[in-house]
Structures are given as C-alpha cells and as structure tokens.
Image (cartoon, rainbow, N blue to C red):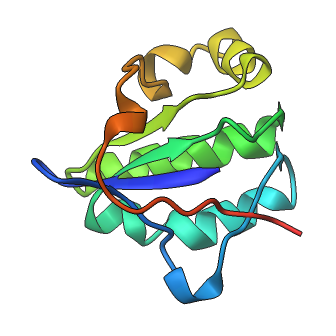
Amino acid sequence: MTTTMRNTTVAMAVAPYESAGPIKVTELVRGNERRLLEHLGQLVRRQSVTLDLSSVQRIDAAGISALVALYTAAREAGHSFIVSRASRRVAEVLALVGLDRILLSHRTAWKSRPGRRLQLHAA
C-alpha cells in the first residue's frame, strides 16, 4: 500500500512517518485497519492523500470503515482522499457497497506523479 500526498499543484508520494520504514499491508481487515488509521488519520487532515491499494488483496467491513473514516476526515478538513490501483477483488467489494464512485480514482496517470514513494508494509 503506498500513500501519495497531494496539495493543489504538487504531488508526491511519501510515507507519513519516513523514519518508521515501509509497512506492507495485504489485507485491510479487522486489526490492520487501526494501523492504517494511525498512519493516515492526521495526514488526511493536513493535505490531500491518494492511497495505492494494489498490494491489498482482501478487505472487510473494518477496512471499509477505515477508508470511509479517512475520506470523511479529509473532506471535513477541505482535502481529498482517493483510493488508487485497487486490486480487482477490493474494487469489487467497494463497488458492491457503493463506494467505488466516491473512493476509487479512475485516473491512469497516477504512476507518473513526481515524488518519493514508500510502501507501507505490515508484519
């Protein structure tokens, strides 16, 4: 999972805690969702964020709830929160609950954004 932080004109991909090292998450399920909220909760209040979910193969209600919480916090702060490169399974689940239109980025140029990229790896 990679985090991209954006403001109005600049795009860069940086982990919220660079010194903490990468955290890889392959399942956004109960227990893992807290880690996502801890890493991104304050960040979405400071700037727009695009979250790359290409490494996430499984998501449950807790993971969906975490994404909605991050989206809500970002919107309340005047920023955007977008999910990009979701795996087919995760995209299907988000579509099933109607969140694909709200959360999923349909831009294909995401990889061309300038900046550093760090993946978040979970143990």
Using the image, determine if residue 98 lies above or below residue 51. above
Residue at the left extreme, as displayed: 9
What residue lies at 53% left-to-right and 50% top-to-bottom? 69
In the figure, is residue 34 to the left or right of 112? right
What residue lies at 42% left-to-right and 72% top-to-bottom? 42
Give percent across and percent down for residue 22.
67, 71
Using the image, determine if residue 7 lies above or below residue 100. below
Quadrant of the image containing the C terminus? bottom right
Could you say which is closer to the camera, residue 119 or residue 72? 119
Could you say which is closer to the camera, residue 17 or residue 81? 17
Give percent across and percent down for residue 16.
48, 73
What residue lies at 63% left-to-right and 12% top-to-bottom? 95
Dividing the picture into quadrants, the one containing residue 67 is top right
What residue lies at 40% left-to-right and 20% top-to-bottom? 108
In the figure, is residue 119 to the left or right of 13? right
Give percent across and percent down for residue 73.
39, 55
In the figure, is residue 63 to the left or right of 52? right
Give percent across and percent down for residue 66.
64, 49
In the figure, is residue 48 to the left or right of 57? left
Dividing the picture into quadrants, the one containing residue 102 is top left
Q: How many marks?
A: 0
Using the image, determine if residue 49 lies above or below residue 110. below
